[in-house]
Image (cartoon, helix red, strand yellow):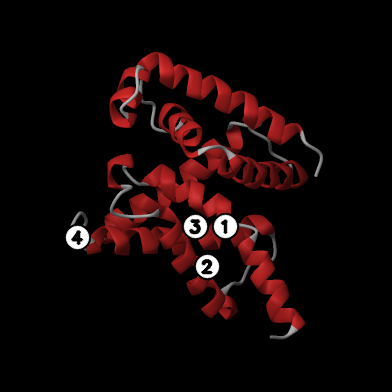
Amino acid sequence: MSREAEGRDRALDQYREYLVMLARLQLDPRLRGKLDPSDVVQQTLLDAHRNQDQFRGRTDAERAAWLRRILAGNLVDALRAFGRAKRDVSRERSLETALDQSSRRLAAWLAAEQSSPSQQAQQHEQAVRLADALAKLPEAQREALVLQNWHGWSLAEIGEHMDRSPAAVAGLIKRGLKQLRGLLEEPG
């Protein structure tokens, strides 16, 4: 493999946890046993690698948007395979919109709306760091945080889904946030 190809692979791989988080946010948590977000992301990165020549952007934000479009198509395909979604262009577009919104919420969790190009680039980098930090949390903490902060579930709903008491869920969220803050404060 050439150095250029290795560099492109590394450039794509840096988005892995970011894409996994976005895929998790779009999939109903009850589908987790049937569909692993990591599998969809692996297919997305494979498709991106194969179609690298179709990428016309220059910035990390443009690359992230391109990867989100590929991810949206792959999520629709995966859901269709389970018979949960029919081929519907409006559904694909709404999933792309939902992925973009999730990406913005992920970035907004870290900072307020920013407008300058340098601030937008910094916000994008922070969103990728947040996704990487979330990936380092224990599964139960990560799931509880995602269900509460992105899906808007109550402690009781999360507890029922995870087969835990609301107090146990509150503890998971508290420990998860503490660990997440520590991970995000680490240099580098």
Q: Where is residue 6 in the image (x, y as percent from the top left)?
A: 70, 76
The quarter of the image holding the C terminus is top right
Cα gap from disc 1 to disc 3, whole angstroms = 11 Å
Residue drawn where x is 62% and y is 46% of the image = 132
Q: Is residue 86 left or right of residue 46?
A: left
Residue drawn where x is 28% and y is 47% of the image = 31
Mark 1 and mark 2 in contact? Answer it, CB < 8 Å.
Answer: yes
Q: Is mark 1 on a helix, strand or loop?
A: helix
Of marks 2 and 4, the one in the foreground: 2
In the rendered image, is residue 112 in sight?
A: no
Residue drawn where x is 76% and y is 81% of the image = 3
Is residue 60 depicted above or below 136 in this figure? below
- Residue flagged by tag 2: what amino acid is it? Leu
Residue marked by disc 2 = 45
Q: Where is residue 58 in the image (x, y as percent from the top left)?
A: 69, 66
> Counting residues from the N terminus, which is met first, the one under dot 3 or under dot 2?
2
**Residue 15, quarter of the rendered image:** bottom right
- Residue flagged by tag 3: what amino acid is it? Arg
> Counting residues from the N terminus, which is met first, the one under dot 3 or under dot 4?
3
Q: What element carries label 3?
A: helix
Residue 68 numbered tag: 3
Q: Position of residue 142 (x, y in %)?
A: 50, 35
Residue marked by disc 1 = 16
Residue 86 numbered tag: 4
Cα gap from disc 3 to disc 2, whole angstroms = 10 Å
Mark 1 and mark 4 in contact? Answer it, CB < 8 Å.
Answer: no
Residue drawn where x is 30% and y is 30% of the image = 161
Cα gap from disc 1 to disc 2, whole angstroms = 8 Å
In the rendered image, is residue 146 in sight?
A: yes
Q: What element carries label 4?
A: loop
Q: What element carries label 2?
A: helix
Cα gap from disc 3 to disc 4, whole angstroms = 20 Å
